[in-house]
Image (cartoon, grey):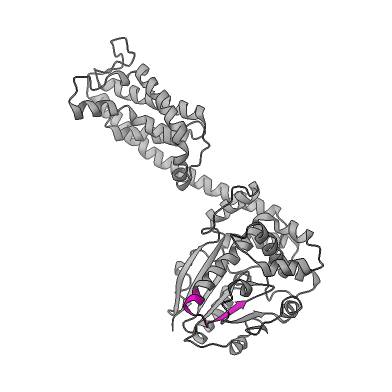
Amino acid sequence: MPFTPFHFGPGLLISLTFLSFIDIPTFLIASVIIDVEPFLVLVFQLNYPLHGFFHSFLGGFIVAVLLTMVMSKIRRYFTPLLTFFKLEQSISFKKIFFSSTCAIFLHILLDSPMYLDIRPFFPFDFNPFYQSSVIPGLIEHMICVWCFLGAILVYIIRLLQHQIKIKKTLLNELNKTPLMLLDMSDDFSLDSGSIEETMLGPLWARATYSKLYPKILDDQQAIQIIEKLDYDFTEISNYLEEWRSLGLLVRAKSFDEAIKKYIENYPDSTVVNIGSGLDTTLFRVDNGTIKWFNLDLPDAIKYRNQVISETSRSKNISKSAFDYSWMDDIEFNPENGIIFFAGGFVYYFKEEEIYKLITNMVERFPGGEFIFEGISKLAIKVINRRAKKAGVDIRVHYGIGNPTNEFSTWSKKIELIDWYTIWARTPINPKWSKKTLKMLKVSERLKTSKIIHLKFNG
């Protein structure tokens, strides 16, 4: 026989080429399983042919049936591994049986030309495929090697096709979705229409979906505010849909976890919410001693004051984030610490503007930390294309690829503490809608939205 591992070459090539008909784990196991027979003969020095009954089509078929029964029970445990390699397959009994039978018969056909003791048509005592020359064996081994190399090529092609398909899916879904700008930016003023979209939208999403999924986020303050507001949220609900609303919920959860962890170490710290809108994070993380500052445009703060009152330890600052005089309004003691956070903010501005803002923060608040949401360059292109198509004079600018080397070039004092895609640390509920599950899966693979955590070293 070709040395057992060589059988993986044809097995991989056939599995990857005929992915719709072949169950990959079953085919690969079946490609080598009957070599347990010669292994046992050699190990235990049995008085039995090296290639006996199970290297016949009859014996192989019996093994295929047994393997089918076993794989039908345990096949689901291979799904995470296939998902890791981007080779998701549905589980089918027919596919498992077909794969078991074909792989074992292929093994027998590959071995038969090389070994006289094989009786492929047992109980008949002959092997019509046997070749006494060593040449066929060498050729078969070379074929197995080339099949393995071919399998690598097919896999690479499938990966590329998979990425293209994902991007097309994301683009199609986003292009079919009404443009919804969720948060604040200096690019537009707050008339009644934009207030509804930019401030009430995220508040409604947190209130509505924290009722449904309090284990992700329990936002009682948002719930109370929404219940008191006399406002028709139908249009906002239709715009946001489930998948966008859950994204806002998970983003808030990510910020909560980072801030809570920070104030455990710095209980008297200062927290600054940049582009606060109608954010209610304070009421979820307050330890009774932190100082809180909400920074936003004058129109936004004016509306916030109507809906959410300041507390004895919180203050609203009516300034643009790029009017650096707001830094003078922040109570900061390096020993007590300071942490900044920003939701839908960074990507509305150009890289140069964010660079200047963060480097100024680094100098003014040494030892501080900054956690924010960033979106990918692909997402920037999609959103801008949708805005242009819709005739909306709003653009997003700053897309972030891999954050690992993004910010260290800005200043040696900037350290990347952590980053992750927005859904990486939140379990997915299989009961969510098919569209939601598809969009979350696609956005995670393309890393369209990510949470980035920086530290300002003094």
Q: Looking at the image, is 366 positioned above or below residue 435? A: below
Q: Position of residue 383 (x, y in %)?
A: 65, 61
Report the side of 165 relative to 229 (left or right): left
Of 65 and 57, which appears nearest the observer?
Answer: 65
Q: Nearer the viewer, residue 176 or 292?
A: 292
Q: Nearer the viewer, residue 392 or 208?
A: 208
Q: Is residue 267 magenta?
A: yes
- Could you tell me residue 375's position as x and y percent? 58, 64
The stretch of residues the image draws in magenta is 262-277
In the displayed structure, does residue 35 sit left or right of residue 345?
left
Residue 209 left/right relative to 429: right
Which residue: 34% across, 13% down? 121
Please tell me whether residue 374 belongs to the stretch shown in magenta.
Answer: no
- The quadrant of the rendering that contains the C terminus is bottom left
Q: Which residue is depicted at the point 62% across and 75% down?
A: 282
Taking the spot 62% from the left edge, 47% from the top edge, the residue there is: 431
